[in-house]
Image (spheres, helix red, strand yellow):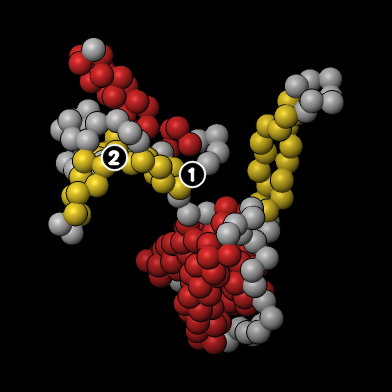
């Protein structure tokens, strides 16, 4: 049941993360800062109420509207399923707190012996919710590149009968892992790259032309 508890905590408990911040007035040029993030379910609820923007920062009104709509639909699906679990287990549904309902359900659920595949199903569902909430609150950014594709050499791409420039596009999240986790793609030949791999491939292709 350890994995089940971990999946539950990912949705209902605050998380701490550390990052390096500039420190121009301190003895060192940078300092380590710890930030406490609200539980994912609370962040989702806050997004519906419009108190957070894309990526946890300010955003344009149309971006906030899209985020709020996506968050509302995500919360509607999750809350319906959690409340159903609670009723089946005989747990109290807290109309003011989905986190409380989920934790109350968990206490009831683990009080009865369960088969491994049943526990795995609930664990997988909650892990999926956590990933979906993170994707909703922090959608990836995209940026196209002016370079030709290092694989197919295309400098244009087609969609719905229309030709567009700049076929290379990067998809990434801001942060320290941007380079490691970001992806590049050519919309002409559909080749996929890691960000470092794409940078090297572009340099190599352009060196051959020079």
The location of residue 196, given as percent across then percent down, is 37, 27
The location of residue 182, given as percent across then percent down, is 41, 38
Q: Is residue 153 visible?
A: yes
**Side (left or right) of 35 relative to 170:** right
In the image, 72 versus 188, the foreground residue is 188
**Side (left or right) of 19 relative to 78:** right
Residue 83 in the image: above or below residue 3 = below
Q: Nearer the viewer, mark 1 or mark 2?
A: 2
Name the residue at 25% across, 19% down. Answer: 206
Name the residue at 84% across, 26% down. Answer: 25
Number of marks present in the image shown: 2
Q: Is residue 42 visible?
A: no
Name the residue at 26% across, 42% down. Answer: 165
Residue 7 in the image: above or below residue 65 = above
- Name the quadrant containing residue 170: top left
The location of residue 160, given as percent across then percent down, is 18, 59
- Name the quadrant containing residue 107: bottom right
The location of residue 159, given as percent across then percent down, is 20, 54
**Label 1 crowding class (10 Å Cα cut-off): few <14, some 14-19, many 20+?**
some
**Label 2 crowding class (10 Å Cα cut-off): few <14, some 14-19, many 20+?**
some
- Name the quadrant containing residue 86: bottom right
Distance CA(mark 1)–CA(mark 2): 21 Å
Name the residue at 48% across, 36% down. Answer: 178
Residue 173 is labelled as: 1
Residue 13 in the image: above or below residue 170 = below
In the image, 51 versus 44, the foreground residue is 51
Residue 4 is labelled as: none
Q: Which residue is mark 2?
A: 166
For the C terminus, the image quarter is: top left
**Side (left or right) of 32 relative to 71:** right
């Amino acid at each position: 049941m350890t994995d089940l508890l971990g999946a539950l905590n990912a949705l209902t408990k605050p998380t701490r993360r550390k990052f390096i911040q500039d420190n121009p007035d301190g003895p060192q040029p940078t300092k380590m800062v710890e930030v406490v993030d609200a539980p994912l379910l609370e962040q989702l609820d806050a997004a519906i109420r419009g108190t957070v923007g894309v990526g946890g920062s300010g955003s344009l009104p149309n971006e906030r509207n899209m985020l709020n709509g996506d968050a509302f639909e995500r919360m509607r699906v999750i809350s319906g399923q959690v409340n159903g679990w609670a009723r089946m287990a005989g747990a109290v549904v807290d109309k003011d707190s989905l986190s409380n309902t989920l934790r109350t359900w968990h206490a009831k659920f683990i009080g009865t012996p369960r088969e491994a595949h049943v526990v795995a199903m609930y664990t997988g569902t909650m892990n999926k919710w956590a990933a979906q909430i993170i994707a909703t609150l922090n959608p990836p950014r995209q940026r196209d590149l002016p370079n030709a594709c290092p694989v197919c050499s295309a400098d244009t791409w087609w969609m719905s009968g229309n030709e567009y420039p700049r076929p290379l596009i990067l998809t990434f999240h801001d942060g320290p892992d941007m380079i490691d986790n970001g992806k590049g793609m050519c919309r002409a030949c559909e080749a996929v790259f890691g960000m470092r791999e794409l940078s090297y491939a572009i340099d190599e292709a352009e060196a051959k032309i020079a």
